[in-house]
Amino acid sequence: MMLLLSLFILFLIGLFTVNIFWTKENIFNHIGLKACIAFGIGSGITSIIYFFQTLFYKISITNVIVSEIFILLILAAILFYKKPIFKVSKETCKVESGKILNIFIPTSFYLTAISSFLSFVIFSLKSPHGNWDAWTIWNLHARFIYRLSGHVVDFFRNCPDWAHPDYPLLIPAAISRFNQYSGHEQLFSAILVAGLFAFGLVFLLVTSISALKTKNQGYLAGMVMLSTFVFIQQAATQCADIPIAFFFLATLVLLCLKDKFKNNSLLILAGITAGLSAWCKNEGLLFIISIFLAHFAVILAKNGFKTAAREVLLIFSGLFPVLILLLYIKFQLFPPNDIFANRGISDYLSKITNPARYAEIFSQLLINIKYYFCRLTGIPLLAVYALLAGINIKEEHKTDINTVLITLCLMLAGYLGIYVITPHNLYWHLSTSLYRLLLQLWPGFILLYFMIVKTPEENFKNS
Amino acid sequence: MYLKSFLSKAGIVTLILLALLSNIYNSCKMLRTFPDFLKIDSVTADELRFLPLKEYLSNTREVGYITYTDNNKIFSLIETRLKDEKTANKAIDIMAQLVLTQYALSPVFVYNQTDLPLVVGNFPDRLPDREFFTKKHLIPVKTFPKGIILLRNEAR
């Protein structure tokens, strides 16, 4: 019961935040899409509120509920002041042609979703603590936050280095918050967080592509995501890779929706989700840089410097509050990151100028792509499908496609660059993390792919 | 024209069927492991091993750690044994034992060293001789079931 209440409050905080910025729109328009983004933003905001309370005093369930309801009331007041909330929507979703299509594709998607959910449940039953990284890092941090409530600073000062006390805390704080609502520690909290982000990501993909292209195209994207080799397994490991993929996708989607809805406020929301990605995992910092560069470059080429600078500033305004919190934690609490700590320029230079490292990285990149993403339902199927279905890049989507493409390329380049300078054994570092980094970018790639290929509706209309 | 239309429809059907079938296949493969997935997993089993010690250490802030392997080799072993799966797995097991000890005993901090006033000995296979501990100036304080021992550092 209390867990349901915690979910409800989290969702409302997210939904109100989304609707404050999703102006010119009724609260119920695109409710599915808003709900997915709201869930992510709500998780991020509530985890920040919860974590900061644990720094200062021993937290109780009353503290948590009162502080969250206080935030909720502020958000509700802003929302109520800004626009009428419960006006009945006039906009209805377009019903596409082809009755069989409209039954066959959604039914297949929901069957895939049910089957994936079943797999997720079985994986979670087999490994309720998640995998190695989950109990070494994320769930261990959650335990420290919950058990050291009021003295969490001790965790940053004394936690052994191998437990990576410098890692961001969205997931541990979210798990700990659910435990607080339950009144005790339980494994289900971590499973719930993992499941919500995994299936939230899939539904975000479905609803966003439905809004940008067509409903059936959205369902196809969801099916491809669900049938990606290791997606469900990785989600059930309870690591932060799928949650960060959710925030990457949410940011990219909001940038794309900005053009569709002609609503610059969505850039502020994109800033918030980009900031939350950095609160989720360190890779989020690279994502923030990538998204700024990509969006600035694309808008600069299209509309000139003034518009590009204004839009980047809007993203920054959403990012700013999260960034301030992050910088405070990074500089005041977190110990230095293992990749950059105590290293001189000569160490970096010796690695950057070593061609053997590049060869090993590219060889591992190809091996990982082949093993994880070239399975039955991976890249080969997508290539064949694109050939059969055809490609249709609409003028209105060109800016979005360029932004997503450049962001993904910058991210990949950044990831590979980190491997070049890593102080760890390169083979070990690549073999234990590269596939997870690729999986973080995969939903963005699927978004890009389904914005480019023709929709089922277009193909059936032509026949 | 007809061929193009046919091919595009075939593409949609192929995509859907392959995605659906691969998912259902995976679920069935997972279901076949029943009732294995209802058994207690290794992490929970390890947590249960440490439960009596955890209760005993309820007022302790930090402890050291000792096992069969030298402390300075616990993390370095993995990097030297990476390419041989068998030895790599053994090295991972040694590392995992330390990590699981920390996971089970948190919020007590477990350090990979023996020069702290209290040291946790983790010997799941068999407890070593007393000599093993005296060489390191460690005196047994309390022995717990399943290869766990709490030691006091004589030098501290």
Image (cartoon, coloured by chain):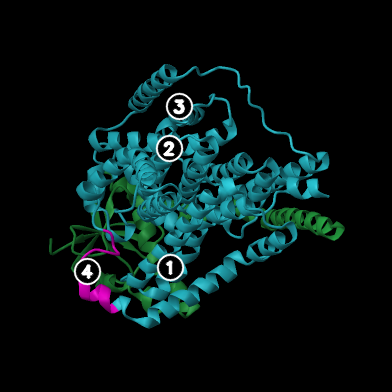
User: Which residue sits furthest left?
Assistant: B156
Residue type indicated by callout 4:
Arg
User: Which residue sits furthest front?
Assistant: A304
Distance CA(mark 4)–CA(mark 1): 30 Å
Contact (Cβ within 8 Å) of mark 2 with mark 1:
no
User: For residue A343, which numbered disc appears in the image?
Assistant: 4
Mark 2, residue position? A269
Do marks 4 and 1 share a chain? no
Contact (Cβ within 8 Å) of mark 4 with mark 1:
no
Residue type indicated by callout 1:
Asp
Residue at mark 3: chain:
A
Please give the letter of the chain rendered in cyan: A
Distance CA(mark 2)–CA(mark 3): 12 Å
Mark 1, residue position? B93
Return the disc, 2 or 3, that comes first in the chain's sequence: 3
Q: Which residues are magenta?
A: A337-350
> Is residue A126 visible to the viewer in this orientation of the structure?
no
Is residue A1 found inside the magenta-colored segment of the image?
no
Mark 3, residue position? A16
Q: Quadrant of residue A60?
A: top left
Residue drawn 41% across the image and 17% down it: A81
